[in-house]
Image (tube, helix red, strand yellow):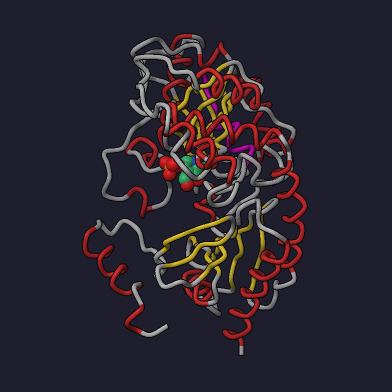
Amino acid sequence: MTTVDMRTPAALADAERWTAHNYHPLPVVIEQADGAWVTDVDGRRYLDFLAGYSALNFGHRHPGLIAAAHAQLDRVTLTSRAFVHDQFAEFCHSLAEMCGKDLVLPMNTGAEAVETAIKVARAWGYRVKAVPAGQAEIVVAADNFHGRTTTIISFSTDPDARNDFGPYTPGFKIVPYGDLGALAEAVGPNTVAVLLEPIQGEAGVLVPPAGYLAGVRSVCDDNNVLFIADEIQSGLGRTGHTFAIEHDGVVPDMYVLGKALGGGIVPVSAVAANADVLGVLRPGEHGSTFGGNPLACAVGIEVVKLLATGEFQERSARLGERLHAGLNALVGQGVAAVRGRGLWAGVDIDPALMTGRQVCERLAARGVLAKDTHGSTIRLAPPLTVDEADLEHAVAQLKAVLDEARA
Ligand SMILES: Cc1ncc(COP(=O)(O)O)c(C=O)c1O
């Protein structure tokens, strides 16, 4: 390839010139994708070990999902919720059954689904629990990531997410993640919900201590408080179960889902809960023009069917063991610690060696895409369709990057 053929620099410069700088992307301009692989505008191929922050659990352009989308594109794509369309009931029914809940409320992005859960919990608090008007409290964890809206960043502890975006929405109490005593102490008579990620993704794939989520369940039960599990990133097969919270044998009152629910094709999110909770909403109180649209539902139906096979959960559990064995072998050789479950890993790089960003840049140069978080941590989350050879290849590239830096 000659420099004349190189389209990447101009494409990067154009993107930089015409967009707000709210991201700091790696210097890769993707043109095509298939399965676990993407190809850039200059024909270079990369293994995608970020998978759209788990929005691509089924890989890029999964044939069944693409077929469902194509078929729906030729029928009807948008109706608004002013009318009912023929894909709506099947999507909501199958998703509700998958979650073991009575009802589903579909939205688009993850943040919208979290906002929905917050509104539902507050309305439940006033209408069912009889919390005094305007006094509802929700307990959340430090280092959370639940999205970017003004209410959600109001209870973020990340200065980048929060600073200069106030005034902040009141009604949230923040406790350390994994500290059951602190959580129990924070719950009071006006607490309507506890909102947690069963594994904190953005924080660096932090798995809570054994028994923590079960303990949270008990605190919620004892105090008539809803347990909301944000499974937007951790759910839908990523950790080896349909939901990460299953590892702890816990059933939350509300599941908040997103990312992979849209099959990597369209934004699809949802809240699932029983009728005594989600049933508190009345017509006109909540909604979204695109939420539950026909294209989203057609893709979502296929996503639920894929998950019903159990194949992706099984792959994640089995291949996840390989991934974690490979990564744990690097501890002491440039890696300080490895966390995670299934095909999901947070890898702390020895900060004396390199930043997470530097590791990701060097991995990209070697044809593997991953993303750093919080200084010296990188996150690995390949599509659940990745094969063993590609998995071993990616770990070998990480080893090579670290070996080079240590040489
Ligand atoms: C746990 C969790 N909740 C919520 C969100 C927000 O989702 P979205 O970016 O679709 O709004 C994310 C996104 O990374 C997430 O990881």
Q: Is residue 358 toward the left or the right of residue 287 in the image?
A: right
Principal secondary structure, stretch drawn in magenta: helix
In the rendered image, which quarter is residue 308 located in?
Answer: top right
Query: Residue 227 versus residue 297: which sits nearer the camera?
Result: 297
Residue 227, position in %: x, y? 58, 27
Q: Is residue 299 toward the left or the right of residue 17 in the image?
A: right
Identify the residue shown where x is 65% and y is 51%: 384
Q: Residue furthest left?
A: 17
**Location of residue 342 with respect to 97 vertically, above or below:** below
Residue 76, position in %: x, y? 40, 26
Query: Residue 173 versus residue 164: which sits nearer the camera?
Result: 164
Q: Is residue 385 magenta?
A: no
Q: Is residue 186 magenta?
A: yes
Identify the residue shown where x is 32% and y is 82%: 4
Q: Which residues are magenta?
A: 179-189
**Location of residue 122 with respect to 262 vertically, above or below:** above
